[in-house]
Image (cartoon, helix red, strand yellow):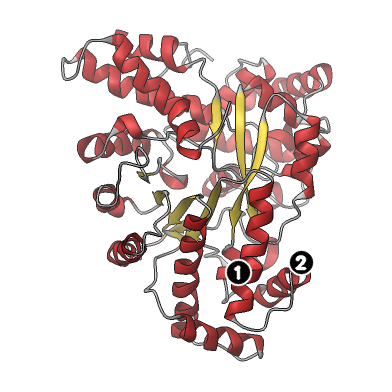
């Protein structure tokens, strides 16, 4: 693995010092991910390199499809070994894709395997890593501890079972796992699963017959999340919609409960109001909100019917809604109901708009109350992270930034934090080297530590 050295991506003496002395050993706070809390609680030894490296990771599945790998070797009935080899076939020439780096680092960090990932080495890697899993008893918790992860926020729908989190707290003491509250299935009145979601919510709370009883049911569930430690929420929207009235939303909701078909405008009436209601609710409980914008989901309807959602068939939406987001935030702010928010965007055309918008709603009660979130999903690559830092520092404030996350379903994804930290140190170190900022290593290093870990701890109010 000659090309990934201790100085990987670090192109100045200052960058190397910043990473080695201020970033490398900082703990990790993964404040947005999709890890399975149930799999963590079971904490079983992984069966093979395939299970832990490829199972459920749609980033890697997508790369394989782009190389023309048949679906049988991705989510189909091929053996784990066959799927493993096909991933290596796709990866060995994926130059420039972050998976080319991430996968190599994953093998070195978690399996002590520094062979280049090539077809020539595939059998050796397979045998070595599978034996390493057995010898080290590799489990989800062992990977989390090895990665120096202190805190994890999973993403959980309002109707999810919460008992698992209490059991995790009893079982593990070196890291914490807390659910971030998400009500996307309740927002998704257009989804075929909507009525079953409402039935489940009703069974957990009380009968739901109108918008008022829906609101009280949602709040009832939120209270239970807060009781077990939830301090963050999450909303995912392709675009922000106009805020409509409670009365209009009630009419649409009752029409849906009656089994009638909704028009697209009626769907937007309901979603526009519920988004506003949720943000007001989150503010009332002093919860931070992570707002993810710009994903166009499940584009391939044939594959969606075959293998379901979150399997690698989403893309960047061209729908921009910055002006509507501004109106929503302004209304909430005028009502003293604007929560702390992290704004994520998938469409790079919206970046400067959102960075500048964040600056319009700050206040002295929280450093960086409105955050422009880290490069996310299709943007969490070297180019995307570098561009993010350039734009954030140009009209925002790097000293308040809450740093990186994984947004991943894989227990091997934590090297992404160090990938970001190297890019951060290279960016700031480069400015130091060119004489564009102070040469005070301790001052710049303090910012690196803050962005790597401490700012997110402060932002979410985590006590250590």
Q: Can residue 27 be seen in this snapshot?
A: yes
Of residues 156 and 110, the one nearer the viewer is 156
Residue 371 at what x, y percent from top left? 36, 44
Q: Where residue 345 sits: x, y (%)?
A: 39, 52
- The residue located at (45%, 37%) in the rendering is 459
In the picture shown, does residue 301 fall above or below 62? below
Residue 186 shows which numbered tag?
Answer: 1
* Image quarter of residue 443: top left
Q: Quadrant of the N terminus?
A: top right
Calculate the distance from the C-alpha at mark 1 to the C-alpha at mark 2.
14 Å
Tag nearer the camera, 1 or 2: 2
Circles 1, 2 touching at the beta carbon (< 8 Å): no
Q: Is residue 312 left or right of residue 380?
A: right
Rendered residue at 41%/25% (across/down) = 450
Judging from the image, what secondary structure is the residue with disc 1 in? helix
**Label 1 Cα neighbours within 10 Å, binned few <14 / some 14-19 / many ≥20:** many
Which residue appears at 47% of the width and 67% of the height?
275
Task: In the rendered view, tell whether residue 446 sits above or below residue 409.
Answer: above
Question: Between residues 260 and 419, which one lies in front from this camera angle?
Answer: 260
Residue matched to label 2: 204
Work out whether 72 lies above or below 193. above
Of callouts 1 and 2, which one flags the residue occurring earlier in the amino acid sequence? 1
Q: Could you say where residue 33 lies in the image, as x and y percent from the top left?
A: 58, 43
Query: Residue at 49% of width from left, 68% of height from top?
Result: 277
Viewer-side residue, 58 vs 456 = 456
């Amino acid at each position: 693995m000659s090309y990934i050295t201790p100085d990987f991506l670090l192109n100045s003496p200052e960058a190397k010092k910043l990473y080695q002395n201020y970033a490398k050993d900082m703990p990790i706070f993964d404040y947005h991910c999709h890890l399975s809390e149930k799999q963590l609680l079971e904490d079983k030894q992984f069966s093979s390199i395939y299970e832990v490296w490829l199972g459920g990771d749609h980033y890697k599945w997508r790369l394989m499809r782009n190389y023309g790998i048949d679906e049988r070797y991705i989510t189909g009935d091929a053996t784990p070994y066959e799927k493993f080899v096909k991933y290596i076939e796709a990866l060995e020439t994926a130059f420039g894709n972050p998976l080319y780096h991430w996968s190599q680092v994953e093998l070195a960090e978690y399996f002590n395997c520094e062979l280049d990932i090539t077809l020539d080495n595939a059998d050796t890697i397979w045998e070595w890593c599978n034996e390493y899993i057995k010898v080290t008893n590799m489990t989800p918790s062992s990977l989390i501890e090895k990665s120096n992860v202190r805190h994890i926020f999973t993403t959980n729908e309002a109707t999810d079972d919460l008992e698992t989190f209490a059991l995790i707290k009893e079982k593990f003491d070196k890291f914490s796992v807390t659910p971030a509250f998400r009500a996307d299935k309740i927002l998704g009145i257009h989804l075929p699963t909507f009525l079953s979601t409402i039935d489940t919510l009703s069974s957990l709370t009380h009968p739901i017959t109108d918008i008022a009883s829906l609101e009280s049911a949602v709040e009832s569930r939120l209270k239970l999340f807060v009781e077990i430690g939830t301090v963050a929420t999450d909303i995912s929207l392709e675009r922000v919609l106009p805020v409509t009235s409670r009365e209009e939303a009630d009419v649409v909701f009752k029409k849906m409960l009656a089994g009638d078909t909704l028009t697209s405008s009626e769907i937007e009436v309901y979603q526009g109001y519920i988004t506003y209601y949720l943000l007001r609710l989150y503010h009332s409980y002093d919860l931070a909100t992570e707002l993810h914008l710009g994903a166009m989901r499940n584009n391939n309807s044939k594959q969606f019917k075959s293998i379901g959602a979150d399997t690698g068939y989403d893309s960047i939406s061209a729908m921009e809604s910055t002006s509507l987001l501004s109106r929503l935030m302004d209304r909430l702010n005028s009502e003293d109901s604007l929560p702390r928010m992290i704004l994520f965007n998938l469409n790079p055309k919206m970046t400067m708009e959102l960075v500048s918008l964040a600056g319009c709603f700050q206040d002295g009660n929280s450093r960086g109350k409105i955050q422009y979130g880290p490069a996310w999903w299709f943007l969490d690559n070297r180019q995307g992270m570098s561009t993010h830092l350039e734009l954030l520092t140009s009209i925002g404030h790097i000293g308040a930034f809450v740093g990186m996350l994984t947004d991943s379903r894989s227990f091997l994804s934590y090297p992404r934090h160090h990938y970001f930290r190297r890019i951060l140190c290279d960016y700031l170190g480069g400015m130091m080297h060119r004489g564009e900022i102070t040469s005070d290593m301790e001052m710049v290093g303090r910012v690196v530590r803050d962005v790597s870990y401490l700012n997110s701890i402060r932002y979410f109010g985590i006590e250590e």
